[in-house]
Amino acid sequence: MTSTVPGTDADAGSGSRSVRRSRFVATLRQRSLLIRLLAVSALVSVCSITATAWVVLNTTAVVLGEERGQALADDARIYDTLVGWAATHPDWSGVGSTVEQLGRRAGHRVVLTTEDGRTLADSDGAGTHAFQRPRDATATVNPLATDIELSEGTTSGTRTGETISIDPRAVGPFRLSAKDGRDLNGIAHRLTGCLQREGVLSRIEVLPSGRPRLVAAGASDGGSLGVSLCPVNVLDAPMPSEKAALSALNSLVDSCLRSRGVGLVRLTITGGWTSRTRTAPPASSVASCLTTSRAQQLAPYVAPAALLFVAGHGRTATTFFDLSTANRLRISEWAAAVLVITVTVTSLAGIRLAKPLRVLTSAAIRMEGGELSTRVPVRGQDEIARLSAAFNAMSERREQSETMRRAMTNDIAHELRTPVSNLRGWLEAVEDGIARPDADLVALLLGQAMQLQHIIDDLRDLAAAEAGELRLAPVPVRVADLLSTAARAARATADAQDVTLSVTADPSTVIDADPVRLRQTVDNLVSNAVRHTLAGGTITLRATVEHGKDSLARAPGVTADGQDRRSAFVLLTVSDTGCGIPAEELPHIFDRFWRSEKSRNRQSGGSGLGLAIVRRLVEAHGGTVTVVSTVGEGTTITLRLPSKARHVG
């Protein structure tokens, strides 16, 4: 009989689904960088397409604006030329050659017709294309009512907002006779000479009627000449050939003003007027009547109004870009093609980029699991290669750090084991009655406790210095006293080893430093030198001041010999004639627990923390420490400390 366990199949299915879900999540995580790259590429593509479309549309708008501006300029030139013709001719006969020339110059077809549709002139004289008259004309050519938007050279006949404007070239009966023109020109030249003698520079400007006028030199549109003794108003008097026309115009204006029930005026040949009645008429009424009267007077002397048509030769104006349905579809197709190409290229680049990253991730996971010897291959010189090299360097450094940590743990255990074992052994001997707790035993136990305390203090100081938590209390310290005190403290040990201690220092040199920490630094160097100096050797403690030479001018803080006290450094050196340190070991002497004697059963003593503490204390003071050593000759360690060094009496 077979028994079954309820829920086994369901549990198996649930576990299988959980495994598949975990694998799916892991796959997504592995490809998350690729997904982000694809998303970024799509975003960049959309932005680039949008930017391109915006540039195209703006460029199109600019081109359209330029084309429209050029078309307006061409139309204005054609219009102005034909208005000038009409202003100086009583009809349109003979205008054909001018229209043909305008058409060739502008590259357009120019057609001039009467208001009832009869063709007056056509630049396409050969009749290559039949002219199909548009619904609206380009402009109406009428010198007595010009279009001020197309003809900037016209002079408005009103100054009160009326749209009627008479071309200044339409002078009709006001054109000067040859004799009157010569007379006025002679007067104008004499007046320019008179003005020049008064220091006023002027020039002669001839109006379409042949009448000259004086304007200030360099000015345009009739610049004022200012106050002058020369009779410049002589040029404003009407000439015989103008008097009849001026009188006829004045009569027309008077008739218009009477019909409006306002006062009468007297016109001047320059276009001005003065009131002839006690009550002056409104300026707007005078301007309106003057324009209407001038148009009435000039009508027989100018060509009748005509319609102007300017168009392309057999075609309508087009641009290189339009938003028709076909063009929109074409733009969409190109945009989709660009998007597909961009995503494809980005995918290939992302796959190639993600592969070494996955290798790095796998190596990092193995390192996290304890495989400190993990390394990754380095290929190429790109960012991934540099990242791989940095990972290998980090892995190697971590492996070295772990080795050093284990060695340090063993060193600490070894350093603490000896005094602790001695203390325990003697205390057990006292407890068992083997030894008596006399003064000698107490002194021995106290020495072991002090050695244990010294190791603990060194570890604490080193940890505080490496963590940046070491606090300094700088005060002025006399360097000679500091070195002498350190020498006296080590003299008993030195004498026992037949080692000579000497101090060379200027008794007046003072440095700003923490006296306790600086004394600790010097004591470590001296005790280290004593341990490694053989009998008959010497140890020299020296202090010198190094002055900066960057300021030779006399200034505050600069002595009479040109030395800048503000950039001074105090050099403290401890030199011995000991066994020396090999060159390959010099870079490591400031590492924790480094010892020149590698044996556990060394005879020189020391915890291997002294020089590490020295370096940290000197760096905390803002200084540097250097070492020079020769095997068999000795070692010199130099502390370079910044200070506001000064000489005191």
Image (cartoon, rainbow, N blue to C red):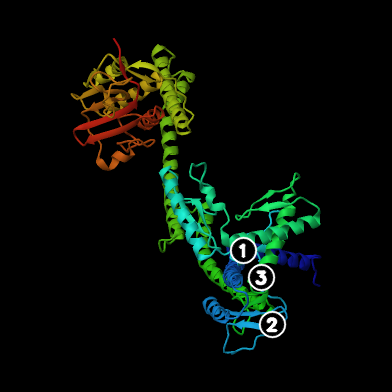
Whether residue 297 can be seen here: yes
Query: Dot 3, crowdedness within 10 Å: few (<14), some or many (≥20)?
Result: many
Query: Dot 1, crowdedness within 10 Å: few (<14), some or many (≥20)?
Result: few
Residue 212, above or below 522: below
Query: Which residue occupies the foreground of this view, 477 or 39?
Result: 39
Q: Going by the image, does 176 lie left or right of 508?
A: right
Query: Which residue occupies the foreground of this view, 647 or 28?
Result: 647
Q: Position of residue 588 (x, y in %)?
A: 33, 39
Measure how far apart labels 3 and 1 are at the Cα level: 60 Å
Number of callouts: 3
Q: Quickly name the residue at label 1.
A: 43
Q: Position of residue 106 (x, y in %)?
A: 54, 76
Tell which tag, 2 or 1, sits nearer the viewer. 2
The amino acid type, in three-letter code, at marker 3 is Asn
Residue 393, above or below 562: below
- The residue positioned 66% from the left and 66% from the top of the image is 147
Q: Going by the image, does 130 lie left or right of 622?
A: right
Measure how far apart labels 2 and 1 are at the Cα level: 52 Å
Q: Quadrant of residue 577?
A: top left
Q: Position of residue 573 (x, y in %)?
A: 27, 26
Tell which tag, 3 or 1, sits nearer the viewer. 3
Mark 3 or mark 2: whose residue is earlier in sequence: 2
The amino acid type, in three-letter code, at marker 1 is Leu
Residue 233, above or below 333: above
Q: Quickly name the residue at label 2.
A: 133
Query: Dot 2, crowdedness within 10 Å: few (<14), some or many (≥20)?
Result: few
Q: Going by the image, does 410 lie left or right of 7?
A: left
Measure how far apart labels 3 and 2 are at the Cα level: 19 Å
- The residue positioned 43% from the left and 25% from the top of the image is 452
Q: Quickly name the residue at label 3.
A: 142
Badges 2 and 1: C-beta atoms under 8 Å apart? no
